[in-house]
Image: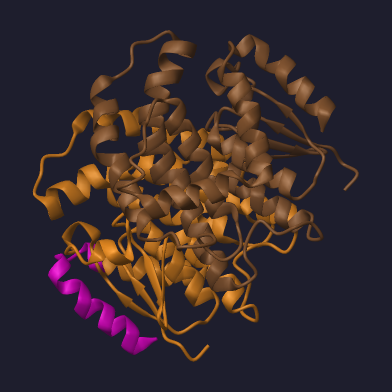
Chain colours: A brown, B orange
Amino acid sequence: MTDKLTIIGAPISPYVRKVLAILIMKDLPFRCIPQVPFLADDNFTRISPLRRIPVLKHGDFTLPDSTAIIQYLEEAFPDTPAAYPGDAKARARARWFEEYADDHFGRNVIFNLFFQRVVRPRVLKQEPDQALIDQTLESTLPNALDYLEGEVPADGFLAGDISVGDITIAAMMKNAFWAGWEMDEDRWPGFAAWLKRTSDHPALMKVNTLADEMMAVPPTEHEAIMERFHAAA
Amino acid sequence: MTDKLTIIGAPISPYVRKVLAILIMKDLPFRCIPQVPFLADDNFTRISPLRRIPVLKHGDFTLPDSTAIIQYLEEAFPDTPAAYPGDAKARARARWFEEYADDHFGRNVIFNLFFQRVVRPRVLKQEPDQALIDQTLESTLPNALDYLEGEVPADGFLAGDISVGDITIAAMMKNAFWAGWEMDEDRWPGFAAWLKRTSDHPALMKVNTLADEMMAVPPTEHEAIMERFHAAA
């Protein structure tokens, strides 16, 4: 537990925020280097073969992939609050929602919306693909929320206590909102209420607020914001 | 342990084979229903929201996603041989390779090759996308093997004992070979030797042989092959 925990990756990424939220829930001290993967040099490929964020450094151990990182934190620090439910079936359900969010929701919903509407114009100075944006707003994202509306409970969370499944989907939704998605709360009332419950968790609120600050300024100012976050932690 | 384990999904899928290989390694009795997702009716969406295989049924518990399934089997049957290494860092490494294989290797390498060259013409009666095939053969797959050549040890496996990381990558490679990939063993000698060691594991060999039989005949005959496999188990 004496080895330092470092997360490499910009908190604007939902994959980074899910890990930071879990670190905060576990009360584990960490430092975050707000790397934007599209701006990383060739050396980044050596620690993240798919050039994705986040990457964990724990002493001399390096680990890419948000899902593998959270499972590792759970196992390396067993005395901290759990990121997964206690029962094997509930844990499996939490992992399924994490995978659904990371893979389908993240890559097919958020990237097609957030990447096109925010990253392409702001970071890459490219035109967005309007057809992808329209398809996401009119079909992919509504279909995903139709599915999740049927899965969220009237009270509580997706797999018992709040877990990595809830945190991951809620982190993704924040990026959809940044990209201008306006959710119809009458169409998805259960999901909207669940999203509020999850987003109100202090750990997720803390990292979402951090990322809100970053969204308001250019990437060159993100390190200074991160330093203030670390100083206050 | 009295509830029946059923795997829904055609063993021609590497995602199904990785789960079947782990079930065999754990010596857990199971039945497999060789469902091809592209031929499934609308009801399939209710048990697999992304219409992917495999899906696990354990009594009345239903779980999609091969990664979540294997982790569930590991936790639900703790007295069986482990699918993951014993040490937290080695387990994290095994999970990273599983994710690398499932996500990048599976979706960007194998689907672009196997799906285009085998599934589209044989199952969907569609023309393959030759540009995708060429890009995969000339760039994506060689780049992935360049990376893995640097990761495989001279002896043994990716994370200590043979684990889900090895099984997953080796299962994927089988589909690349079915799609006509000819591996240059002089360019990737370490990977080729590791692949042989992994593919020689009796559990993987058993499911690869089963799938070889299925590859040789139309899908209408797969159930009969599966029944013979169950009868012999």
**Residue sticking out furthest to the bottom:** B2
Give the main secondary structure of the magenta stretch: helix
* Residue found at x 33% / y 16%: A128
Compared to B132, does A155 lie above or below?
below
Whole-percent x and y of residue B2? 49, 91
Whole-percent x and y of residue B115? 25, 46
Range drawn in magenta = B214-233
Residue A54 falls in which quadrant of the image? top right
* Residue found at x 45% / y 19%: A119
Residue B42 falls in which quadrant of the image? bottom left
Q: Is residue B159 visible?
A: no
Quarter in which the C terminus of chain A is drawn: top right
Q: Is residue B157 visible?
A: yes
Tell me if A44 is positioned left or right of B114 in this view.
right
Residue B105 falls in which quadrant of the image? top left
Whole-percent x and y of residue A27? 79, 47
- Report the number of numbered marks: 0
